[in-house]
Amino acid sequence: MAAQQKTFYLETFGCQMNAHDSEKVVGTLVSQGYRQVPTVEEAGLVLYNTCSIRDKAEQKVFHRLADYKKLESQGKKFGVLGCVAQQEGNKIFERAPYVSMVCGSASYRNLPEMLVQIEAGNRRVSGLDDRETDECFETEFTARTNPHRGYITIIEGCDKFCSYCVVPFTRGKERSRTSDSVLAEARQMADLGYTEIQLLGQNVNSYRDPSRKKSFAELLASVGELPDIKRVRFMTSHPRDFGRDIVEAIDSVPTLCDHVHLPVQSGSTRVLEAMQRLYSREQYLERISWMKSARREISITSDIIVGFPGETDEDFEQTLSLLDEVKYDAVFAFKYSPRPNTPAISMDDAIPDSEKSRRLAVLLEKQRSIQQRRNHNHIGQQLEVMVEGKNETRGQWIGRTSQNKTLNFTAPANCSFEQGSYVPVQITTAFPNSLLGEMVQSA
């Protein structure tokens, strides 16, 4: 590949793990002499970092590739990265012959060698480790896109094998970084001016230190105790591995954000068993009780799937009753969609899409009402926000609280805040999905 062609465009789909993977991919390419450009038209190498969690993910990728097939004549090369790449493998070359590189997320460490092959004119370069790989994608070249909030992947892969999920097959087995390497990266980020760190993993609390020095809760606390770090978050936790020690750490270390995302997926033990979630409704509620009894008020959010094969009206009612019992601060709810190579795809008693849609609408309306009441409780409180930007049209600053709630606020016209600033705000109004307030004048 000629020097003038060593430009690349990268588009990312999916979760925060994918977004952070892309930061590491970008850094790797730049370290190899590539330059990132903002449009496909300017790029010599076009990359798509893909997600396969949702329905028709593969079709979306192939449709996007087809849109740009005409650009092949301009000498551009195309690569598919991530979960769809691992799931579809070399079949991508057959369906889209103009693709030159297919690289699964477990093989990103091989990117430098793969780029050399691309530059040498190889038309089919693949990196597709099986799920037994022990390697993590650690790189000193991460190109972080936010100068104040940074992400650190501490565990990759998944060993839980939920019956509806492709992640164990596309991301490989669970493999953790040493606590020393995580803390070294966190210290480096603090030295560079980052004040918020988010620890990432498909099941972040399933972390197992290879050096056996720290548990997940101990690592969390250690990151939170680093100088100049003001906030530490973690995403996403699995209920089976959620211990009381995590709650104790949040209570003990003020910089640990008072927010836990704990996906439940269903309020019915029968459905949870069919999903192979490895816990019952009662066991999940026990973990909720640990958080409810904490000294700090912990915001709890969750993921829910409606319309899983065989989900009865009674099962769905149990999910609705769980919302009433837990009173989540936010829920990300989805209709069940069959994914390739998963046990659930061959299950009987498929729920009609119209019924899935109805159940989803009912659940979201109930949750909206719960969120309105939960957010109303903040009126009159003073909360600290991390400034993320400004809505010039409304004249409001945009921020996020420690509980991960969006808080828009007003301030005197002579006040100006940089992204990443921390500002005390008095809450005046509550909406289902956000809060509104005024900067505390004494600040």
Image: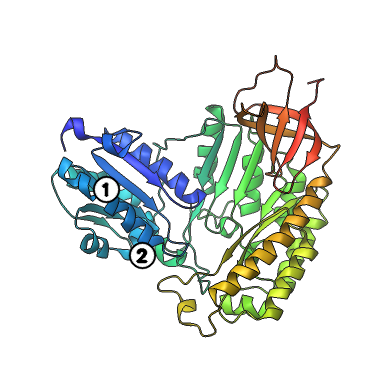
Task: List x then y, in percent, for residue 417.
Answer: 64, 22
Task: Identify which amino acid the numbered label 1 is placed on.
Answer: Tyr
| Above or below, 274 relative to 34 | below
**Residue at 47 percent of width and 35 percent of height:** 145
- Inter-mark Cα distance, 1 to 2: 22 Å
Along the line of sight, the residue nearer the viewer: 442 or 175: 442
Determine which residue is flagged by label 2: 87
**Residue at 38 percent of width and 45 percent of height:** 11
* Any part of residue 125 in sight: yes
* Any part of residue 133 in sight: no
Determine which residue is flagged by label 1: 68
Quadrant housing residue 24: top left
Q: Earlier in the sequence, mark 1 or mark 2?
A: 1
Q: Nearer the viewer, mark 1 or mark 2?
A: 1
Task: Identify which amino acid the numbered label 2 is placed on.
Answer: Gln
Task: List x then y, in percent, for residue 424.
Answer: 76, 29
Task: List x then y, in percent, for residue 394.
Answer: 66, 29
